[in-house]
Image: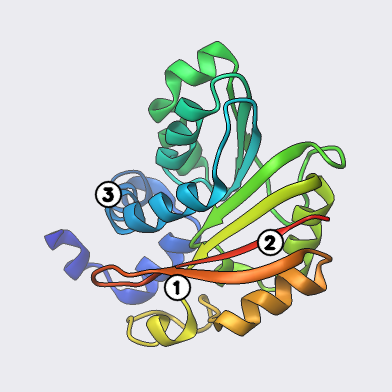
Amino acid sequence: MWIVKLIPSRILSLQARKPSGLIGRFVMTKIFNSGNAALNAFVKECLALESRDCVLEIGFGPGKLINEMANITTEGTVEGVDFSKAMINQAQKENIGHIASGRVLLHECECSLLPFEDEAFDKLCSTNTLYFWKKPEDYFAEMFRVLRPGGKVVIGFRDDEQMSNLDLSEDIFNSFSKSDMVDLLTNAGFKEAEVKEKDGVPFVSLCGMAIKA
């Protein structure tokens, strides 16, 4: 996408964290839809969704994965939280049919304080959002709280080695290793924490996975 080369890396980094304005609505939507496609597909695969699942996505961006999950959970619901108005608007357009049927619900909020009761979801996911969490332990604690016993969490991410090859503002992006991911999940109370990998170009897709016992 040629226009990306004209945007300073710091502005792109800020937009990646919280898309806004015309850049957020148009440029970041295209970047997210293309750049996250393989990782979103791996997240969906790792979730092993069933028709009755109630699912939550944290930081849903343009809402492509929300839509794909709702196509599977035909007897359940998919909810999403994001703090970007631009992404909420895009996700509403992407999911207009599912929203009208009541099977997709989108919420505007800061994701370290989730507006849900305890044990509200069967499965939970997030893709390429971990880097922006200044206190990631707060987010993982909230994820643990809202998952039902036996529920699964899947976090799609790029590890510190992959992130080091990108032109990103280090004061906006935090990097995490595979062992960091396992530690975050384990320290939040999850069991059977692991990181699964799937080969791809230009990135290997990584998913941190765990179960709430």
Name the amino acid type tagged 2: Ala
Question: Of the residues under marks 2 and 1, which one precedes in the sequence?
Answer: 1
Q: CA distance from mark 1 to mark 3?
A: 19 Å
Question: Circle 2 is placed at which residue position?
Answer: 210
Which of discs 2 and 3 lies nearer the camera? The answer is 2
SS state under label 1: loop
* Residue 31 point in image, percent of width and height: 29, 55
Viewer-side residue, 168 vs 190: 190
Q: Pick whichever of labels 1 and 3 is earlier in the sequence.
A: 3
**Residue at x 30%, y 59% (from the top left corner):** 35
Few, some or many residues within 10 Å of mark 2 (<14, 14–19, 20+): many
Residue at 49% over, 35% down: 69
Q: Where does label 1 land, which residue?
A: 158
Q: Which residue is mark 3?
A: 30
Q: Is residue 135 visible?
A: no
The part of the image, by quadrant, that contains residue 190 is: bottom right
Q: Residue furthest top?
A: 101
Look at the numbered discs 2 and 3 and tell me whether their residues touch, using CB distance below 8 Å.
no
| Label 1 CA crowd tier, 10 Å (few <14, some 14–19, many 20+) | many
Type of amino acid under label 3: Lys
Q: Amino acid at mark 1?
A: Arg
